[in-house]
């Protein structure tokens, strides 16, 4: 059945974790009949450094400590207060999940930054982006693989009935592949990473996810060029923000079709619904954003049952009510897509 989920970031500050986790679980449980849900571990990024996506993922790295530097997170010689803060936030989140998700049986999403975006956003202890060093980025992928393996085990220990889905956020993979990311100085660009190397970097993390008994979905944002490497790396699904594609593009949907025909599931990121003062949220536009190109490229309508919908990441902080409204709207969009799949 067509499914609804989310990335993880959620509004809130210290002390709000349990309430946020309960809200997500309750709202997803209240979706229309015939619509599936993948509940997700919330990330209250408003708590500050260590709760952000890079710091949170860096806390998972096996024997590769990180700390905050002048330009963001960087590798460190020894674990420090920044790493301990990030680890404490993660423990708090898992504790809240254990309470809120008592008795949960079925899929449960946890999002971490993927190896290429992490290599692009993490700085070496005394140098440029980790991405600029071939050996360092290989070591980073292996450290992340071991950390993700451990993280899946910890999640399953808190929620024994969970079928864990690891969502690897790779919004910078397209820039990594294109070679457009600036160096530390800003006067040059880091060399482009060819497709085979992209696959090689993703594989150890995807394989670790599978070894831990979980599923792997790689979220690409609007970066459609990343679809073939994700498929070749053995992922179970790929995320694509449809609102950022700029309309119909046959090249994009050819790649989507090939990936789905190989058995990968599409996780379609949708923008917030536009709102009319007369008729409310224009959910038909979101239904069309998925269903029209799906039909136009020749994919069977029944395949819409395998699509998961989620809100595309916001560039600005939204309120709890806005996040909840998005989940409710996605539920109604999923219901419409499920009806088309059954027709």
Image (cartoon, rainbow, N blue to C red):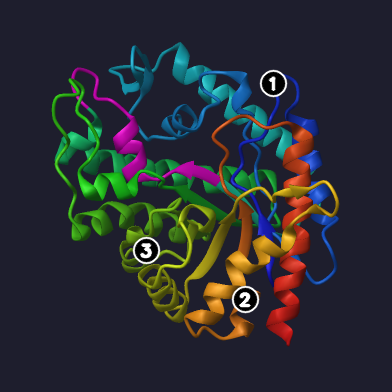
Residue 50 vertical placement versus 318 (above, below): above
Furthest residue in direction front, as rendered? 278
What residue span does the magenta drawing correspond to? 111-128
Residue 218 vertical placement versus 68 (above, below): below
Residue 330 is left or right of residue 299, and the answer is right
Residue 331 is left or right of residue 230, and the answer is right
Residue 182 is left or right of residue 283, and the answer is left
The quarter of the picture where the N terminus appears is: bottom right
* Residue 13, numbered circle: 1
SS for tag 2?
A: helix
Residue 227 vertical placement versus 185 (above, below): below
Could you tell which of marks 2 and 1 lies nearer the N-terminus? 1
Cα separation between marks 2 and 1: 37 Å
Cα separation between marks 3 and 1: 35 Å
Tag 2 residue: 304
* Number of numbered labels in the structure image: 3
* Residue 227, numbered circle: 3
- Please check the rendered image and state whether residue 112 is part of the magenta-colored stretch, yes or no: yes
The quarter of the picture where the C terminus appears is: bottom right
Could you tell which of marks 3 and 1 lies nearer the N-terminus? 1
Indicate the position of residue 302 as horizontal and vertical percent values. Answer: 63, 84
């Amino acid at each position: 059945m067509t499914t609804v989920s989310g990335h993880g970031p959620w509004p809130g500050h210290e002390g709000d974790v349990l309430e946020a986790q309960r809200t997500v679980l309750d709202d997803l449980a209240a979706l229309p009949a015939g619509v599936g849900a993948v509940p997700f571990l919330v990330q209250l990024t408003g708590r500050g450094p260590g709760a952000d996506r890079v710091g949170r993922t860096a806390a998972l790295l096996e024997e590769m400590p990180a700390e905050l530097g002048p330009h963001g997170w960087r590798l460190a010689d020894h674990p420090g207060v920044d790493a301990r803060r990030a680890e404490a936030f993660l423990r708090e989140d898992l504790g809240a999940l254990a309470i809120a998700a008592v008795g949960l049986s079925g899929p449960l999403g946890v999002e971490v930054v993927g190896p290429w975006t992490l290599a692009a956003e993490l700085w070496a202890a005394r140098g440029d982006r980790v991405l600029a060093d071939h050996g360092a980025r290989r070591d980073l992928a292996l450290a992340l693989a071991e950390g993700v393996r451990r993280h899946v085990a910890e999640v399953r220990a808190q929620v024994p009935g969970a079928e864990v889905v690891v969502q690897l956020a790779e919004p910078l993979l397209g820039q990594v592949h294109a070679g457009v990311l600036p160096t530390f100085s800003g006067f040059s660009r880091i060399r482009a990473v060819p497709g085979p190397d992209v696959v090689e970097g993703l594989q150890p993390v995807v394989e670790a996810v599978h070894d831990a008994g979980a599923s792997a979905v790689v979220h690409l944002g609007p970066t459609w060029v990343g679809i073939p490497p994700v498929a070749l790396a053995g992922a179970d699904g790929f995320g694509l923000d449809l609102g950022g594609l700029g309309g119909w593009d046959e090249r994009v949907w050819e790649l989507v079709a090939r990936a789905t025909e190989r058995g990968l599931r599409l996780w379609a990121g949708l923008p917030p619904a536009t709102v009319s003062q007369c008729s409310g949220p224009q959910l038909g536009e979101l239904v069309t954003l998925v269903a029209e190109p799906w039909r136009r490229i020749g994919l069977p309508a029944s395949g819409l049952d395998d699509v998961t919908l989620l809100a595309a990441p916001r560039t600005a902080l939204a309120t709890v009510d806005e996040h909840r409204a998005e989940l409710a709207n996605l539920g109604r969009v999923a219901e419409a897509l499920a009806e088309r799949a059954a027709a």
